[in-house]
Image (tube, rainbow, N blue to C red):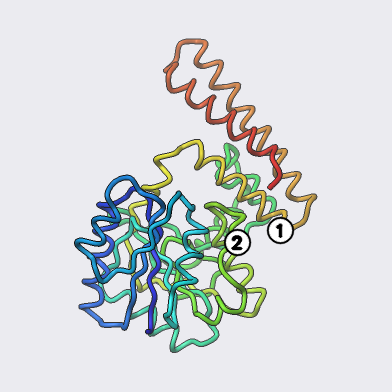
Amino acid sequence: MELSIIIVSWNVRDYLARCLDSIAESLRTAPVATEIIVVDSASSDGTVALLREAYPHVRTLPQAENVGFTRGNNIGLMAAQGEFLFLLNPDTEVRGAALAEMVSYMRDHPQVGILGAHTLNTDGTHQSSRRRFPTLLTAFFESTWLQPYAPKGLLERFYARDIADTDIAAVDWVQGSALMLRRAVYEQIGGLDEGYVMFSEEVDFCKRAKLAGWEVVYHGGAYVVHHGGKSTEQVSAVKHIHFQRSKVRYFRKFHGLGAATALRMFLIASYAHQMLLESLKSALGSKRALRRERVRTYRQVIRALFDKV
């Protein structure tokens, strides 16, 4: 078995079907000996029935509960038999011969342990999926209300904007929505850290791989469309909580307690500031239902950030 494709799915049946159809088309274009494993996190939309009826070639691993992205991928990794392992989101579609191209590149470059695809948005525009490792300064600005005020060049370096979208280039980490790894990497460093329920798990994984001596590469010629966040958008507050807690966990793990504490306090202050603004806008009569929902979300995030990560 050359390639194992691992997909963790939760209530995205129609997107998953499109994903599986795109894989079949890609393999018809350029065959690769492939197994497909779908780990279903207790979906209630008929996903498992669809897989058994319409995709009997897919190995379906139904779970009794929502196991989350990280644990779900680890379940798939433990079951996989391939020389190369491809973590693929269910809301993606493989384009052309991307699977064969990525396997071929890995074979030709044995020092490369992780390979990321060129990811496109639904409308065909480029989706940034390559990064350099974040510094603490980056963490204060990236994906916070301070982002528009970031020092010139700080986020450009983090987003690796000096690399063209169609380049093949070494990077620090690649997005986990379409990430191929060598079995040898998995056997050496283990699976994803389940302390991250979702978000930052691929940063952590790539960091561990690089510390173990492997290269991480972005492949600008292998295309995958990512419709983006179709599972996580179903639970907005949970998304915020996991995103920020995962960021703190990463810094605690690789930069120490001091950096993690500073980041945690900043995030708590940031969400408190936003909560106050939304409360004031609600009191003034501006979109009260929306403002109240945001206040509830921010309050949940603040509580979660006080918990140990």
Q: Nearer the viewer, mark 1 or mark 2?
A: 2
* Residue lying at 38% horizontally and 79% vertically, measured from the top left: 3
Asked where in the image residue 202 lies, by quadrant, the reply is bottom right
* Residue lying at 37% horizontally and 84% vertically, measured from the top left: 1
The three-letter code of the residue at mark 1 reads Lys
Q: Horizontal and vertical percent for residue 299?
A: 59, 28
The residue indicated by pointer 1 is: 253
* Residue lying at 53% horizontally and 40% vertically, measured from the top left: 240
* Residue lying at 40% horizontally and 48% vertically, measured from the top left: 229
Asked if disc 1 and disc 2 are in contact, CB closer than 8 Å, the reply is: yes
Residue found at the very far front of the displayed protein: 64
Q: Under tag 2, what secondary structure?
A: loop
Foreground residue among 231 and 209: 231
Q: Under tag 1, what secondary structure?
A: helix
Foreground residue among 219 and 231: 231
Position of 182 with respect to 307 (left or right) is left
Rounded to the nearest angstrom, the CA distance separating label 1 from label 2 is 11 Å
Q: Residues within 10 Å of mark 1 (few under 14, many from 20)?
A: few
The three-letter code of the residue at mark 2 reads Asp
Position of 244 with respect to 227 (left or right) is right
Dot 1 or dot 2: first in sequence order is 2
Foreground residue among 147 and 190: 190
Q: Residues within 10 Å of mark 2 (few under 14, many from 20)?
A: some
Foreground residue among 168 and 21: 21
Q: Horizontal and vertical percent for residue 81?
A: 43, 79
Query: Residue 193 — which label?
Result: 2
